[in-house]
Each structure stands twice: as structure tokens, then as C-alpha cells.
Amino acid sequence: MGASDALTERAAFLRDSLHKSRTNTDRMVSMLGSFDHRLSALEAAMRPTQGFGEPRFSYLLSLVMQVRTYAIRMAHGNIDKTLKSADIILGYFERMREAELKLSRGPRDDLESYLTAIDQLRSISRFFSSNKSLRNNDGVVNQANNTLLKAVTRLEDEFRSLLTTHRLQQARVVISVDRLPPTCYNLLFAIAYRARVMFFLLFTYLCNVLFVSGFSKPVPPDSLFGSLPEISQPLSGSLDQQSESVSNHSENQVKSSEPSALTPPKLIPPRILPLLHKLAQQLVQAGRQQQCLKIYREVRSSTLEKSLSSLGVEKLSRDEVQKLPWESLETKIGNWIHHMRIAVKLLFAWERELCNQIFEGIGSVKDQCFSEITANSMMVLLSFGEAIAKSKRSPEKLFVLLDMYEVMHELQPEIESIFEGKACSEMRDSAFTLTRHLAQTAQETFGDFEDAVEKDASKTFIADGTVHPLTSYVINYVKFLFE
């Protein structure tokens, strides 16, 4: 600030000096004009007494006076131009001083004025940079650039502060959404009830009848219910009636809960979004695009990961998935289906909308930023699906593979819409690859089941001519695959 004050004082002194020079020049021109007038009157009075050489002397004297008058008038014009230039330069110094004063207060209290001051200071820096002929020009430019650098650094801090302050709201929203009766849990309950009953009946039969050597007497179907979990045993009525009742109950719950579960909340107050947009614009204009993206990525990606963690999303390697017992794995697969729907339909959709609003009109920054924010979270979800798709095949996994395929196929259009752009192509391709692997694994698993049935070497016969238990179970198994 001391150098700016000194330059301002020197400019003011120059302007005062030019004003005095202009006043003195005006007086001189006036005096010369009066002198010229008097000389003309004297020449007219002396004309009758002039000799032969005197007219020439008078002409020369008049010519000299005109040249001097012209020179003084030219000097007067130059002083006017210089004075105008001094006024312009002094005006820039005054605006520079005002801008520095506003910047010294920081962006917290009045961000709009702070951003306006940065624009003014940037304009002043361009003016002095383009006028190399001015003395002490480099000093003024260096001072302006140093002030701009400090101001932009404080903008980065404010950008981070606003994002951090308002990120906490998302975790509360996600937890409240998870506590609502979500669509996928209701649907899974209906599907899992039917599939689990059929699976235990079929799988137990295959284990006892087909794959245990020396077993010659078929197990009565009613006795198989003793090996089922208590929650899966039918209490009354047929299996179809009970599952239909569960499905109808689930559908009714879905209709009542779906709108509230999918209503997008206001993660960041509307009054904050324009400020974040302007801050991002200023940072990019100042050449701090990478720093801006880094701040946004650090804040939003950690927020997204915490939101998924609050839902119960775990990062499991392929080896860890392989070591899990089937009961735990089945539960995690059901949770994964629920998490995929929430992540794509809510969390990722919110992040895309937020990126579009904050980085609107700032090149292709929004696609790159969104990609960096969601990459890790998306890959955690997809890697679990890939681990299941590439795990060892077994008959009990067929139903969950189909459920996983169904949800990926359902979310495919939204994934393509949300993860649009070249920057997100890797995640789109990964999601498509997972969908294809799940379909392929389900197909191979069903082929394994077909081979097991064809290779059945049991010698069990039905004496009363009724349907063979294996035939009944296979038909029901296939029936439930198509429902």
C-alpha cells in the first residue's frame, strides 16, 4: 500500500504542476497577443516616417512574433494532452487504491464487492502492462499482480469454506432417505421370499438325491421344510398365494413411499449456488483451474463417500467376497442392489446437477470435475458386482445374479445420461461391462444346472405314478425364473 500511496502523490503533484504550467502558458499567450496588438499599432503610426529598409524589418519582426505565438499555442495543446493523460493515470491509481482497500477486508462479509475489486485490479494491471512507455510501469504491474495473487488465494479459501459448510446437509438427507421404505427393499422381499423357498427345496433335494451316492430313498417334500429358515416356512395357504400377497403388499408400500424417497433435496441453499459459480469463474480466469477442481473434488468426493458409507456401502476385494459365507453374501447382494439404486438415482444425480450449476459456462470443466468426484464411489459399487459375476458359479447364485442384472439393466439409461461426456466414458463402459458379465454368468449358471439335471444318475422310481420330485422341482425352478 505504501508504494501505491507514493505513486498517487507523485501523480497528483504532476497534475498540479501541469495545471500551473497551463495557467502560465495562458498568461504568456495573452501577453504576447497584447504585445502583438501594440506592435501593429506602433507600426501603423510609424509608417509615414519609415525609410526604404524599415518595412522589411517590420515584416521580419511580425513573422518572429507569429512563430513564437504558434510555438506557445502548440505547447499549450501538448500540456492539455499531458494533463488529460495524467488525469487518466491518476484515475487508475485511485481505482487501484479503492480496489486494494476492498480486498484487504476479505470476501467473507461482501463477496460481490470483493469480486468487483478483483475485476478492477485485473483491468488496471492490463492497462499498465499495455503502456510500456510509462515510467515506473513495472513496479505498478508487479504490485497489482501480487495483490491479485493474494486475493485469488483468499478466494480459494472462501470456495472451500462454502463447500465445506454446506456439505454436512447431504449426509443427513441421505440417512433420512435410507430410513424411508425404499422401492427396492419391498420388491426384493417379494422376490427373495419366492426364490428362497424354491431354492432351498430344490437345492436340498439335489444335494440329498442327486449328488449323495448311496441315497436310494427320496426325501418327502414336506420334510424339506424342516431345513428351511423359520422366516421362509409357509404358515398357511399355497406358496403362490402367499408370495402374491407379499407382492401386493409391497406394491402398495412402493406407491406410497416412492415419491418421498426420490424427491431431490436442496443440498446447497439457492443463495449460495450463484456465489460458488462466481468464485469458480474467477478462479478459472485467474489461471487457477486445477486448484479449483482440486478443492471441489476433495470436498465433494469425500462427502459422497461418507454418504455411501452411512448407507452401509463397503469396499470389498474379490478375495474377500469369495471368502464370505453364502448367507452373508446374499444379504450384501440385496444391500448392493439397494445401494446402486440410491447412488445412481439420487447421489450421483445430485452431484451431476450441482456440477452443472456451479461450473455452467466454464468450458468442459463440469464433466471432468464430476468424473473425478464420482469415480472412486462408482468403482467401489461396480467392483463388488464384478466380484460376484466372476465368483465360483453355484445354483443358489442364479436368482441374485438375475436380480443384479435386472437393476443394472434398469439403471443403464440413467447411467448414460448422468455420466455423459468423454470424461465419464470409462465409468459408462464399466457399468455396461458389468451388465454383460452378469448376464453371461447367469446364463452359464443355468447351463450348469441343466447339466446337473441331465447327469442325474439316481435310480428313484415313483410307484404310484405321480410326478417325479425332480421333475416337479425343475419345473417350479424354471417357472420362478420367468416370473
Image (cartoon, rainbow, N blue to C red):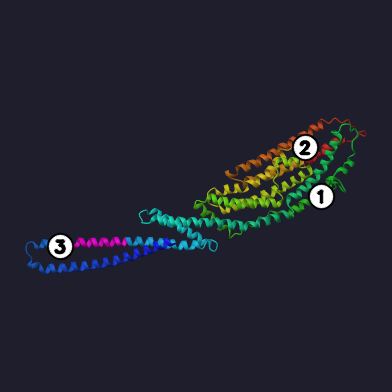
What kind of element bears circle 2? loop
Residue position for label 3 = 61
Labels 2, 1: front one: 2
Q: In the picture provided, is 367 more to the left or to the right than 479?
A: left
First-in-chain label (3 vs 1) = 3
Q: Main secondary structure of the magenta part?
A: helix
Q: Looking at the picture, which amino acid does disc 2 mark? A: Ser
Identified at 75% across, 50% down, the residue is 185
Q: CA distance from mark 2 to mark 1?
A: 30 Å
Total marks placed: 3
Viewer-closest of 78 and 258 = 78
Q: Is residue 339 visible?
A: yes
- Answer above or below: position of 317 versus 273: above
Q: Which residue is mark 1?
A: 245
Q: Secondary structure at mark 1?
A: helix
Q: As shown in the figure, which amino acid type bears the numbered disc 1?
A: Ser
**x then y, percent, for residue 358:** 57, 54
- The image quadrant of residue 67 is bottom left
Residue at 55% from the left image edge and 62% from the top image edge: 108
Of all residues, the one furthest to the right in this rendering is: 464
In the picture of the structure, the residue carrying the numbered disc 2 is 394
